[in-house]
Amino acid sequence: MADLPSSPGLPAGSDAPAARGERLRLATVWLGGCSGCHMSFLDLDERLLALAPRIDLVYSPLADIKTFPARVDVALVEGAVATSDHLELIYTVRARTRVLVAFGDCAVTGNVTAMRNPIGPAAVLQRAYVETASAGAGPPDDVLVPKLLARVVPVHHVVPVDVWLPGCPPSADVIYAVLTDLLAGRPPATGGLRFG
Amino acid sequence: MTVRTLVIDGEPVGAREGETILEAAREHGIVIPTLCFLEGLSAVGACRLCLVEVAGAPRPLAACVTRVAEGMEVATDTPRLRAYRRMILELLFAEGNHVCAVCVANGHCDLQALAAAQGMTSVRFPYRAPARAVDASHDRFVLDHNRCILCTRCVRVCDEVEGAHTWDVAGRGAGSRVIADLDQPWGTSDTCTSCGKCVQVCPTGALFEKGRGGGEMTKRREFLAYITTARQAHRWIR
Amino acid sequence: MNSRRIVIDPVTRIEGHAKISVLLDEAGRVAEARFHVTEFRGFEKFCEGRLFWEMPAITARICGICPVSHLIASAKAGDAILAVEIPPAAERLRRLLHLAQLVQSHALSFFHLSSPDLLLGFDAPPTERNLFGLIAHHPEVARAGIRLRQYGQTIIELLGGRRIHPTWVVPGGVATPLLPAVRQQLLAAWPQALEDARTGLDAFKRVLDAHAEEAAIFGTSPALFAGLVDTAGRVEYYEGRLRIVGPDGEAVAEGLDPTRYQDYLGEATEPWSYLKFPYYRPYGYPDGAYRVGPLARLNVAAACGTPRADAELTEYRQRTGRVALSAFYYHYARLIEIVHALEQIGRLLDDPAILDRDVRARAGRNRHVGVGVAEAPRGTLYHHYEVDDDGRLVRVNLIIATGQNNLAMNRAVAQVAAHYITGDDVREGVLNRLEAAIRAFDPCLSCSTHAVGAMPLVVDIVGADGRLVRRVRRDPAATSR
């Protein structure tokens, strides 16, 4: 996607938060996915206790900050871009984040969330809200309920991505290695990771 | 037998006349990634993953169908080739509907493994998301067009090894697809012997055994070497 | 006309994407409250054409939190299509995997997501009210929660090959038998897990009295309760018959065959949410609102059937009455269920029959319809498949646990809103209590909308003409206008 604006990119060496003696400002974002990648993050288990003093979780479905803050060092973005809400959020995330990590197969490829693409949103809504419903007025139509996009797309088809982390979900060990690299200001090694 | 001497990746290599660059390289332990190629079947140079650079050639050549020549200088792993290979893989992923996570061949798929080996962690091209069918009319096997990369291994093994020639490719361009007999449901084919060779050689989850769940379709390819050795050398070993 | 709409966006620390809106009347009293689910992925449609054998792997991806429940329900629907009886060891192993998931999922819900409210306080700074705040202020509770979840996840990993989205459960049974060494490893870690569950229960009981107000207010509106029970009326997660009781504890329906759910359950839609509204047909919509999940299961069942859990259940009922109405007690019920699940895990592992190597029945498609039902952590889960002669899906219907709490969640939000909100004086802690009312149900929205995020928490006060009258942002960094 050559016409997209470039990202601020990976923090290098002395530029890394750890080198500045600061905690890493980490955000985790959940777009169209199953939350399995977030669960894999929690699978860090007791390593979470060790990470806690080095990280500020500044935005996450696991936390209560409702506005995506400024100056985020790393954002782990789970899920594909599937609704108008996702689209709005991902632009904000990109604008305020230094290193955007496409976190898991849905963010990287669209994966299962994109399985509706050959059919399109109208048919899936018809099945769920008309054909299998026994009462009601059909698919949602309210300003608070976002529209499904015509096509589900991976994150980097909308905004530039710095690191791709494939896997459904990526294992806790992989997540830990990437976070450790980013804390140290190294570009994470993701070569050899496979989809699925 | 005439011997040809060539240079692959800076190493002098001896090869028999008529051999391909791929065969010569493999005999010397040089790994060139392949996808449509399978030892025991004819080579068709369809997927272009085995592209190599040959000094003096205006463009990269497919190692599986290019014969060795005296004094040939071959490079198998250059930045340009790596970029092409990555692009080929990305195009394959963008072209069909490859959802590795829920595929029967997850963990046992040549396409998935090649992407990992080539460091392909994302696809830059728009996904086509074509509407394709699943043919489950055969009692024992399933053909899922969503996962077919048109490598024609199935077509070749059915024709060259089994001798049934059930499979062919119909259509053009993006509309190309593998068909059974006269473009009919596989289960109604008169020629299919239900031998399952096509299923075993298929590099992806496009052909699989009915009843397999996610990641359960492992592919067994040893039979191919067994049959070819038996036919050519009359030795019934693998 | 001066009615106004207050919006909480997003609702956080729940497993999904949602907003809450509160509509005020002219006098500034709460007229209506809505829980909007904002995600939808469409599994029911895009699975068409796939083979039913593939469905466990696909439907596991509905939810990263409770993939195992989908594996189980999907494989059971597959068993029905194969028309086979699965080997006894396969059933034991499926139960073990499912109980392990109940432990990890309940631990996540209580320790990782809800306990920050309970232990740090509803009025604690939003920047602290999360797992990392818990680690900083209550490290021992946090550690117990992490370890307990880890125990469940480890069982899943050792049986199924991976922690999230294992594909080990298959139509006809499971893919591989249990290895003796794995059984020993899981037995060895068992006592610590039980102790960690005890830590959670103790912590909860300490805060229960301090939150008497919340306990009394959190969604006490009457509703039906539904859950599976065994032949002796005990809590059952894998099989059993559906029992529905009223708010007085009297049975409304008994012995319902869950595979015939369509006879007695309907699904309604509303234009303001992607989450559908299942209801008990004989009572109609919306009067047929019912609740599922831990609270409902304990209300519906006579007992758990294991000694430690039954002792806890007795104490629980002394505190809540025979039928617990307040959604606040979901937490309590969840912790008792963890103990119950661990006891059952112990029993299953103690029995050498679980090592039997015959774990898979093989067959082709023998029927055209299969319904698979199980008690997921959040309530009863239904997978309903119809296939063609070749085994390809022609119709898929999924009724997910959380959806069945949708009507009750909306009522709970309305109740909390009515109690705390008058006029446009909306304090931060009040908004969090609204969210907590939802959180208590532990909605798994990944599942229920077959979907799965987050945005600013904004309270929009909207005039009846749709004009924004006032916007209050909860984030301290943001400004009001």
Image: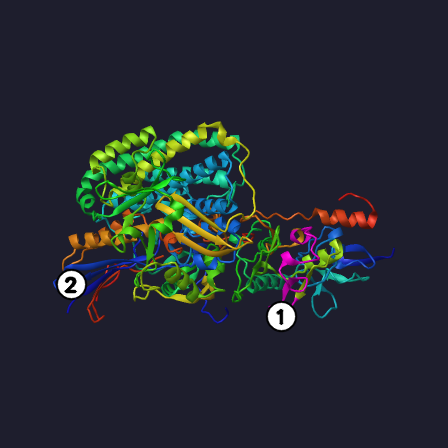
Name the foreground residue: C458 vs C48. C48
Give residue B173's mark: 1
Q: Nearer the viewer, residue A143 or C54?
A: C54
Q: Secondary structure at mark 1?
A: helix
Specify whether residue B189 is painted magenta: yes
Residue C89: x and y, percent? 50, 34
Quadrant where the C terminus of chain C is found in the figure: bottom left
Numbered circle sitting on residue C286? none
From this view, report whether residue C420 is shown above or below residue A143: above
Q: Which residues are magenta?
A: B170-199
The mark total stands at 2
As rendered, which of C264 and B46 lies closer to the eye? C264
- Packing grade of label 1 (10 A; few <14, some 14-19, many >=20) is few
Contact between marks 2 and 1 (CB within 8 A): the answer is no
Q: Chain of mark 2?
A: C
Q: Which amino acid, by three-letter code, is at mark 2? A: Asp
> Magenta segment: does it hold B137?
no
Please indicate, yes or no, whether residue A21 appears anywhere in the rendered image.
Answer: no
Side of A2 relative to B143 (left or right):
left
Q: Which residue is mark 2?
A: C25
Q: Residues within 10 Å of mark 2 (few under 14, many from 20)?
A: some
Displayed quadrant of residue C311: top left
Q: Which residue is drawn at the image coordinates 49% and 29% (left, top)?
A: C353
Pick out the residue farthest to the left. Answer: C27
Residue A38 position within the rendered picture, expressed as x and y whole percent measured from the top left: 41, 50
Snapshot quadrant of residue A60: bottom left
Q: Amino acid at mark 1?
A: Gly
State the residue at coordinates (46%, 62%). A116
Residue in the image at 62% along x and 70% along y: B173
Residue drawn at x 70%, y 59% as measured from the top left: B166
